[in-house]
Image (cartoon, rainbow, N blue to C red):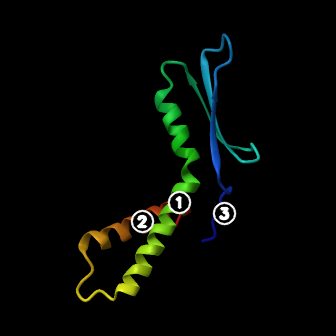
Amino acid sequence: MYTQFTPGPWFMEGTKLHGDPFIHYWVRDENRLSICSMVIRDLSGQLEEANARLIAAAPDLLSACEKALKEMRDFGNIANWPFEMPYSYAVTMNLLGEIIAKAKGE
């Protein structure tokens, strides 16, 4: 399956217009094109702002997971483990693979 993403970096912006009871959050790419938007009633806005920041970090998080998995695989190949790979190492590699597949819709 081929999945194309809007390339990062992505940024989060938020605003509340005077007299408007809603807070508007946008996640945009570097060209200021909208990736997603959220409009919430102004209670505290903390949860929604945190969600917008997490969405904005998605391309960086995916890239970090891919790099970490590659490094772990490369190290495992270089190390030629003289014994079985540590369980936690294998679990972490599997988790990274699952996260990457989920992000790519695989």
Mark 1 neighbour density, 10 Å: few (under 14) some (14–19) many (20 or more): some
Q: Earlier in the sequence, mark 3 or mark 2?
A: 3
Along the line of sight, the residue nearer the viewer: 104 or 91: 91
Task: Tell me the distance, in whole angstroms, between the alpha carbons under discs 1 and 3.
Answer: 13 Å
SS at circle 2: helix
Q: Amino acid at mark 3?
A: Gln
Picture quarter containing residue 52? Answer: top right
Which residue is painted at 58% across and 45% down in the image? 56
Asked whether the residues under the numbered discs 1 and 3 touch, taking CB atoms below 8 Å apart as contact, a structural biologist would say: no
SS at circle 1: helix
Q: From the top left corner, tell me how far across and down residue 104 is, in percent.
A: 55, 63
Q: Which residue is mark 2?
A: 96
Q: Which residue is mark 3?
A: 4
User: Comparing marks 1 and 3, which lies closer to the viewer?
Assistant: 1
SS at circle 3: loop
Q: Amino acid at mark 2?
A: Leu
